[in-house]
Amino acid sequence: MTAPSSPVSLTRYLLEEQRQDRISADLRLLIEVVARACKSISVAVGKGALGGVLGDAGTGNVQGEAQKKLDVLSNEILLEANAWGGHLAACASEEMDHCQPIPDAYPRGNYLLLFDPLDGSSNIDVNVSVGTIFSVLRCPDDVPQVGDEHFLQPGTAQVAAGYCIYGPSTMMVLTIGHGTHAFTLDREQGSFVLTQKHMRVPEQTKEFAINMSNQRHWEAPMQAYVTDLLAGKEGPRGKDFNMRWIASMVADVHRILTRGGIFIYPWDRKDPSKAGKLRLMYEANPMSFLIEQAGGASSNGRQRMMEIVPSQLHQRVPVFLGSKDEVETAVRYHLDHDRHAG
Ligand SMILES: O=P(O)(O)OC[C@H]1O[C@](O)(COP(=O)(O)O)[C@@H](O)[C@@H]1O
Ligand SMILES: [Mg+2]
Ligand SMILES: [Mg+2]
């Protein structure tokens, strides 16, 4: 009889990856610090109405969005945890206008960390899953003072990305470029335990996720694509599709990593000056890295997401990600439309 294999903690997984020269000691420590911060956020989220953390903070962020108390608190937890680590050169966040370099008094490292401290925060007050999304880049060498411009690297330059979902269980889903793996928080032990190695997104799907209330504002190829999905068996796609929308990207992407599907937040005419709703650097890129590492695909509708060269820290993009064949189909509608238009 073989002995039951002992659970693999996040720490053990990262140490093994370091032993195999897939990550540096600094990157390992950085991920450990982010995981520790996520545990604190998980505790705060879990207290709900008892913790006095629900509701609005009464402030706004750089994107003009009202901040929830938990948006502000999660941002502070991540900043505080990372300031001391010695592995970072600077942090950038959805909740801060500009990046925050590590203060001179603290040891400075070679990595840049971006995060959406609390994603899906409109769901906090109704007790629906929210999450933290993060992305890690290398800081260019010999930079005397780190600025926003040093973060403007394409998604292909990410050395690690992940999210933590605060749902019925708290899970961290992580990639360092060698597959996408899920770790579940053992609340009694206080450690993340590897519960799903090499997640795979099925190439085909019958499930899509989109906010249909924006339909009338979409561009023509997007209208055509969704019309064909809704036509089901009787339409050109020849099969019925189901729809889900949690309005928390972390939760929608987690479902897609678990059972497939396509997640779409397209450009719309509500505010034509915005290229999309979601942010490239700390929402779309890290999710694209995770999805690609699990065999899925991610695009802005016309171009592979991770090849976009960013021009702004808080840049917005249209997002199409998930099951490979379905993302390619949606992209085809856009490219065919562009070809015919001219
Ligand atoms: O309310 P809408 O327009 O459907 O938008 C939902 C989307 O907005 C977001 O909540 C934006 O994230 P934040 O909560 O971090 O601002 C995504 O998680 C989600 O996919
Ligand atoms: Mg978000
Ligand atoms: Mg957020």
Image: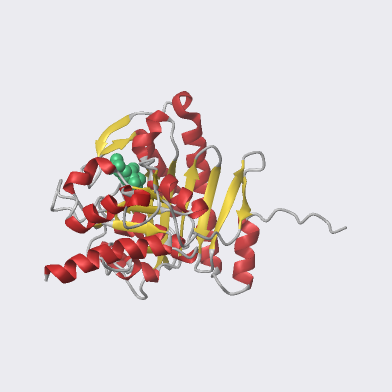
Q: Quadrant of residue 301?
A: bottom left
Residue at the front extreme of this rendering: 234
Please name the residue shown 23% across and 68% down the image.
335
Counting from the top left corner in percent of width and height, residue 97 is at: 25, 51
Q: Residue at x 66, y 38 (%)?
A: 188
In this picture, is 324 found above or below 223? below
Depicted 217 relative to depicted 52: above or below: below
From the viewer's side, name the closer residue of 240 and 319.
240
Query: Percent position (x, y) of residue 176?
Result: 50, 65
Q: Position of residue 221 (x, y in %)?
A: 21, 58
Image quadrant containing the N terminus: bottom right
| Horizontal side of residue 260 vs 3, given as left or right | left
Query: How many numbered tags mark residues here?
Result: 0
Is 184 displayed left or right of 92 in the figure?
right
Q: Residue furthest right?
A: 1
Say above or below: 100 vs 339: above
Q: What is the quadrant of the C terminus in the image?
A: bottom left
Q: Residue at x 56, y 72 (%)?
A: 22
Residue 95 can be seen, yes or no: yes
Give the percent coordinates (x, y) of residue 173: 51, 54
Q: Residue at x 23, y 55 (%)?
A: 224
* 251 and 243: which is toward the camera: 243
| Display coloring | secondary structure
Left or right: 46 with respect to 214? right
The foreground one among 50 and 258 is 258
Residue 100 visible at all: no
User: For the view shown, which residue lies furthest in the top direction?
Assistant: 50
